Amino acid sequence: NGLILGIPQGVHYHIFYVTATTGVTSGVITFETSDDPDYAGTWAALPESTDPATTQDNPLTVAVAKLIYTYIGELANVRARISTTIAGGATPGVTVKYRGSH
């Protein structure tokens, strides 16, 4: 599981930038949320993108270089979980960056 990001109250627009390393051919990232950052059970998967301007839906298949997923609504805590192994290339991996706004 990825790092847990606590989202400040009042942030309603969330953008997640997903970048695969060179040569990645497969893998899946699922964005999940929980009201408790220490919750040890199964977190809730975020729904398909709630921004009509975005075509990427959750979960994201990372067989391409750059993906963007957006969610509109309040979140307490969020994480990106590798739900299918990232594979391909010399050093398979993925980076997720977050930007939120009111």
Image (cartoon, rainbow, N blue to C red):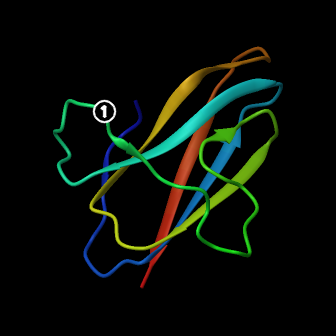
Is 24 displayed left or right of 83 in the figure?
right
Please report the residue visible at 20 percent of the width from the left and 46 percent of the height from the top.
37
Please name whichever residue, 59 or 100, is drawn nearer the observer in this view of the structure. Answer: 59
Q: Which residue is mark 1?
A: 42
Which quadrant of the figure contains the C terminus? Answer: bottom left
Tag 1's secondary structure? loop
How many numbered tags mark residues here?
A: 1
How many residues crowd around disc 1 within 10 Å: few (fewer than 14), some, or many (20 or more)? Answer: few
Where does the image place residue 58, in percent across and percent down from the top left? Answer: 60, 48
Q: Quadrant of the N terminus?
A: top left
Rendered view: 78 above or below 65: below
Residue 74 rendering spot, x and y as whole percentages:
35, 72
**Image point 80% across, 42% down: which residue?**
65
Name which residue type carries label 1.
Thr
Q: Is residue 26 left or right of residue 98?
A: right
Residue 15 figure quarter: bottom right
Q: Kindly give the residue lying farthest to the bottom in the view shown.
A: 102
Query: Nearest the camera: 9 or 34?
Result: 34
Residue, x 69% and y 44% (percent of image)?
19
Residue 72 point in image, percent of width and height: 50, 73
